[in-house]
Image (spheres, rainbow, N blue to C red):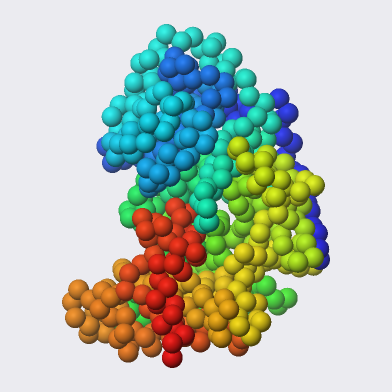
Amino acid sequence: MREFSLPALYEVPADGNLTDLIRRNAAQHPEVAVMSRKVAGAWTDVTAKEFLAEVRSAAKGLIAAGIAPGDRVALMSRTRYEWVLLDFAIWSAGAVTVPVYETSSPEQVSWILEDSGTVAAIVESGAHVAAVESVRDRLPLLREIWQIDDGGVEALVTAGAGVPDATVDERSAKARADDPATIVYTSGTTGRPKGCVLTHRSFFAECGNAVERLKPLFRTNDCSVLLFLPAAHVFGRLVEVAAVMAPIKLGCVPDVKNLTEELASFRPTLILGVPRVFEKVYNGARSKARADGKGRIFDKAAGIAIDYSRALDTPRGPSLGLRLGHMVFDRLVYGKLRAVLGGRGEYAISGGAPLGERLGHFFRGIGFTVLEGYGLTESCAATSFNPWDRQKIGTVGQPMPGTVVRIADDGEVLLHGDHLFSGYWNNEAATAEALKDGWFHTGDIGTLDEDGYLAITGRKKEILVTAGGKNVAPAVIEDRIRAHALVAECMVVGDGRPFVGALITLDEEFLGRWAADHGKPAGSTAASLREDPELQAEIQRAVDDGNAAVSKAESVRKFRILGTGFTEEAGHITPSLKLKRNVVAKDFADEIEAIYRS
């Protein structure tokens, strides 16, 4: 199939903007808890009426500071309650939010604030203030900086105390559906990040149709979602706006190191994450089982879960033996795994990278279905996802209702719909290249099956061509290799080379457990163990598993375990965990050469 679409389930209001949602919630659900925030270590609910009042108060402070309609205001912080509050306050002042990753370097901060013409910045910490101040001479339009951890929100409220409610109402009504809501800068795997202009229409079309299609996951007064993705990333913003649109209760977690504890205390019904989160849950549970001497039981339970899930897609369904085995392991294993994820949830939505067919079946088999989706910053996050009632594991689902997916003659995925960005800020050339005749050219390669389910097989710019002329899409094998507990990252190489190779970095957390289990010296690191025969054999098993997914010509023949990881600080990965292949190839050129020396 070359093209597929679904009719829209939600009508975008032509004369509205996203601030309408919080006013509607306060009017229709005044006492419903729409947010929850940490106060003295405990989750404390915030009702729709209270949230609107807090947003209004912060918006008054922005207006008092001279923020005008259409002004750009930067927001640089970890994922926390104040992020959501200030995002809606910026919109309520008639302004446009420019999110900045809290890990951004001063150079990145300088580019985003200068390019967007930011007039004010709200940052989280003193370190963020220092980063902005260090490049302030390049930012002639920047007038104000507020720091959240130093009473910034309270300062806004105090400054705006004299601003009438009517002024906020007037400002809130300024923006229309086709006006910019935010400028989200791409992570920039190559070159300077580009500012994607996402309108209020983009978010209405995106979140309205997603909430309608996934209605059982967005029940007001019953469902909740815990946001631990970076709020600066478009996927995080999707979670934020969709939760407010439903509305369901939204909680924010700034530090994923404490995610297990936060899941247990918040107990969400819905989780939105990236594949690495679900891989960690699986690998962590398996490692713990092995440490407790229950590794064989866990592996048996995992096998039953996967077989049970696969059987759900057959005409006859699971056999009696599978159903009995599943029932036993549900009491012994699966229930405990669901408890790790909060205990109340039945669904998760995963995006950002392929989840992997086996892992998808494992989670559905334990009673926690991960619905895989696909999207880009330019498509306001998801442009396709698996519906809750018609999942096809191994695909990224059907197009968002109201949108169209087309496969070009060269296999590129093209998109059309109201959810798309309106263009790149201050970059007409890049906009013209990406948006042609109303179609957004994603740069991804994919296929559509007979039911309109999309599968992504690689990126046009990442296709490797070996010396023998074989085209290789790295994503398929990289994702399979990365699913191994010991593997943190994998980058396939081989462009113009005689065969395909791979650079592999190790997950330090699981490396420590593996080293202890295999009698390696205490404190062993990737650098000290990279040539260890047992470790090499273990990684070879991961590579063999990856090779099973591709043809012989596309398989990894040799690999190198690196003594260090790919880091955001070194420029190897973006804040959204995408590999900057050109940077990695440059920094590890000697390691790549070593693959082909012998």
Q: Is 74 located above or below residue 544 in the figure? A: above
Q: Is 113 located above or below residue 142 in the figure? A: below
Residue 437 in the image: state x and y as whole percent. 80, 47
Locate residue 359 relative to residue 14 in the image: left or right: left
Residue 448 in the image: state x and y as whole percent. 75, 65
Residue 97 in the image: state x and y as whole percent. 51, 33
Q: Quadrant of residue 517?
A: bottom left
Q: Is residue 252 visible?
A: no
The residue that appears at 56% across and 42% down in the rendered structure is 195
The residue that appears at 47% across and 43% down in the rendered structure is 232
Along the viewing direction, whichever of 481 and 485 lies nearer the viewer: 481
Q: Quadrant of residue 384?
A: bottom right
Name the quadrant of the C terminus.
Answer: bottom left
Name the quadrant of the N terminus.
Answer: bottom right
All told, the count of numbered labels is 0
The residue that appears at 71% across and 25% down in the rendered structure is 15
Along the viewing direction, whichever of 292 and 578 lies nearer the viewer: 578
